[in-house]
Amino acid sequence: MILYLDSSAIVKQYVVETGSAEVRQAVTESEINGTSVISHAEVIATFRKTVRAGVLREEEAVKLRRSFDRGWPDLVRTRVTERLIRHASTLAWTFGLRGYDAVHLASAAAWRQALGRD
């Protein structure tokens, strides 16, 4: 199985929340895991947000960030290009998606196409 992860799915690998067990199992069972390069900033921002919200202590968030940074090279990362953004914009308009959600959907579609899985 080949698995595309948006930033919320990546966070579920590090922070225990609803769906974490399912994401961890899917990641373990997949042959290749990928995401968009924008996920790095989104995941780090989420770790910081959990500290501000009192969900995690600073030290815990720092450990999660280090662990995430170590695992980042293991993910296939799709690049954000003008073409991808144009596709994301069309998806956002058509389906009423938020900006980064549309970028993730366009990234997953581009990766699928690159793999010849259309």
Image (spheres, grey):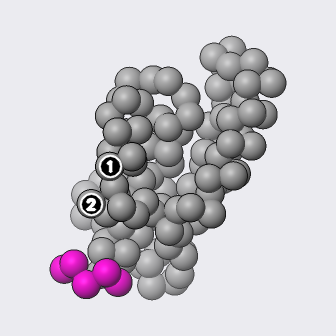
Q: Residue 91 appears at what percent x and percent y? A: 31, 66
Q: Is residue 2 magenta?
A: no
Q: Residue at x 30, y 74 (%)?
A: 112
Q: Which residues are magenta?
A: 114-118
Examine the rendered structure and indicate whether residue 63 appears above or below residue 118. Answer: above
Q: Dots 2 and 1: beta carbons under 8 Å?
A: yes
Q: Residue at x 53, y 81 (%)?
A: 81
SS class of the residue under badge 2? loop
Gap between marks 2 and 1 measured at Cα: 7 Å
Q: Which residue is mark 2?
A: 1
In-image side of 54 versus 11 (left or right): right
Q: Residue 60 appears at what percent x and percent y? A: 73, 25
In-image side of 14 versus 25 (left or right): right
Q: Is residue 115 magenta?
A: yes
Q: Residue at x 62, y 63 (%)?
A: 73
Q: Residue 99 appears at what percent x and percent y? A: 46, 57
Q: Quadrant of the N terminus?
A: bottom left
Q: Main secondary structure of the magenta part?
A: loop
Q: Quadrant of the C terminus?
A: bottom left
Earlier in the chain: of badge 2 and badge 1, it is: 2
Kind of residue at badge 2:
Met
Q: Which residue is mark 1?
A: 29
Let me know if residue 17 appears in the view: yes
Kind of residue at badge 1:
Glu
Q: Residue 114 appears at what percent x and percent y? A: 35, 84
The total of numbered circles placed on residues is 2
Examine the rendered structure and indicate whether residue 109 appears above or below residue 70. Answer: below
Let me know if residue 38 appears in the view: no
